[in-house]
Amino acid sequence: MVLEGLGKSLRNAISRIAGANSIDEQLIEDVVKDLQRALLQADVNVQMVLQLTKKIKERALDEKPPAGKSTKEHIVNIIYEELVNLLDNGEGLKMEPQTIMMVGLYGQGKTTSCGKLALLFSKKGFRVGLIAADVHRPAAYEQLKQLGEKVGVDVYGELGVKDAPGIVKRGIQQFSDKKVIIVDTSGRHALEGDLIQELKDVAAVAKPKERILVLDSQVGQQAGPQADAFHDAVGVTGVILTKMDGTAKGGGALSAVANTKARIVFLGVGEHIRDFEPFNAHKFISRLLGMGDMSALIDLAKQEFEGDADIEDASRHIMSGRFTLKDMYTQMEAVSKMGPLKKVMSMLPGMSKMEDKIDYDESQLKLKRYRVIMDSMTDAEMEDPRMIKGSRISRIAYGAGVDPHDVRDLIKQYEQSKKTMKGIMGNRKIRRQMMKQIGSGELGQ
């Protein structure tokens, strides 16, 4: 999870409000100190922390809760709003036809971010082209070619040619049929004069709508000066922060970039090509505080299951009151496609309260084991698990290479899931929403 340590510390501070018998000035003072400690440990700028917590304290003491909201709810909402205000510098990158120029120093994750961005646009239905204009790093062209092959996107480059503006010009001509063109530019260990000139020349040829700076979040508060320097050179329109998965320094980079009024557009949250999240201050803070992000979960599901008939079939079975092991198998496959279990669960409201009670690694292994067990079952057994008894359990366990106890554990989990699904479908609001999605073809799209 992004900034896991900071999120846990913030949630612990807020839990003091939820568990208090009454709200008084001393409690607010204690919570503010907890917030300060959490933010400073995450390397957030000291002055920003003091300004933020001062505003939270003033509002918590002076503002009265609006009608229908308790004092506790109001104070939590104040904390949420002020944290959002700290990071909210405008809307993210628009998913529309455009040319994007990527800039950054060596080792920041720029080329990898090009591949991640290309995958994101291609999944939205755009024809994408990548241009390898990093003419100084020997492996840059080959790395971009490999990324292009991985995500199914064409790459243009000229091995051994040092004329970056010329490569970009010819690449744009080659990609006249592409709706989105992403230009990977050269980096340095420092922003030197010849690099600045090259970037200006490339920008003059590419005429990019977006000039995106890629920054390694582990540079901490130095992200601010780097963002300023690149902005002065080429007019940065957005920032991608990489290596945001769990690093404490990420708080410093986030706040430093936000303080420059730069627009953070994406977060790199892992090495996998899919570990890339659009940045939205409201959603980001909501997840940090344990409020979940259901819209992000739905977006992720739509990306992963486009045209997946099995997902729609499973949904219709559940709607009709049926829930078989086949449907459970489909659900497990869906969860595994969406990424690490901890990432998926963090998007569910309230799951942060369970984080110390869940062994995510063990749960992930158990899901894999269950799928292997179900692969050893017949279609009839998958459709009617009630017949799985005695010798069938022994046969299935032998075929899956597990203990019979594991098969019984799966059946027990299935019965619990079936009961849960029955309860969910008893909620008329949820049932109507699912019927609407199935009817309009939104599920699996």
Image (cartoon, helix red, strand yellow):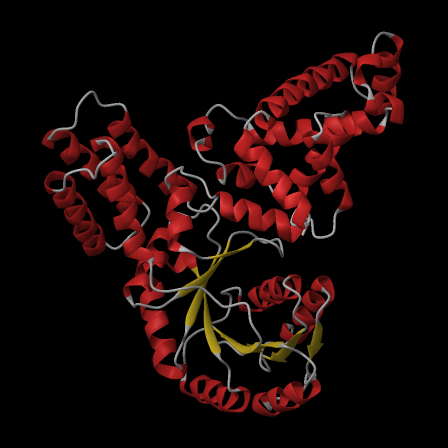
- Which residue in the rendered view is the most extreme toward the top? 390
Q: Identify the image quadrant of residue 59.
A: top left
The reply, left or right, for residue 213 in relation to residue 326 is: left
Eyeballing the image, is 258 above or below 187?
above
- Residue at 70% over, 76% down: 155
User: What number of labels is visible?
Assistant: 0
The reply, left or right, for residue 102 in relation to residue 120 is: left
In-front residue for pair 255/97: 97
Instruction: Measuring from the top left, give residue 108's x and y in whole percent.
Output: 49, 65
Whether residue 350 is visible, yes or no, is yes
Whether residue 388 is visible, yes or no, is no
Q: Identify the image quadrant of residue 18.
A: top left
Q: Identify the image quadrant of residue 290.
A: top left
Instruction: Measuring from the top left, give residue 10's x and y in whole percent.
Output: 32, 38
Eyeballing the image, is 362 above or below 305?
above
The reply, left or right, for residue 211 in relation to residue 118 is: left
The reply, left or right, for residue 109 in relation to residue 57 is: right
- Residue at 46% over, 84% down: 195
Instruction: Measuring from the top left, give residue 170's x and y in whole percent.
Output: 66, 90
- Residue at 58% over, 79% down: 134
In-front residue for pair 430/135: 430
Eyeballing the image, is 366 above or below 145?
above
In-front residue for pair 17/307: 307
Eyeballing the image, is 197 above or below 144?
below
- Residue at 77% over, 41% down: 310
Instruction: Measuring from the top left, give residue 157's x and y in whole percent.
Output: 68, 82
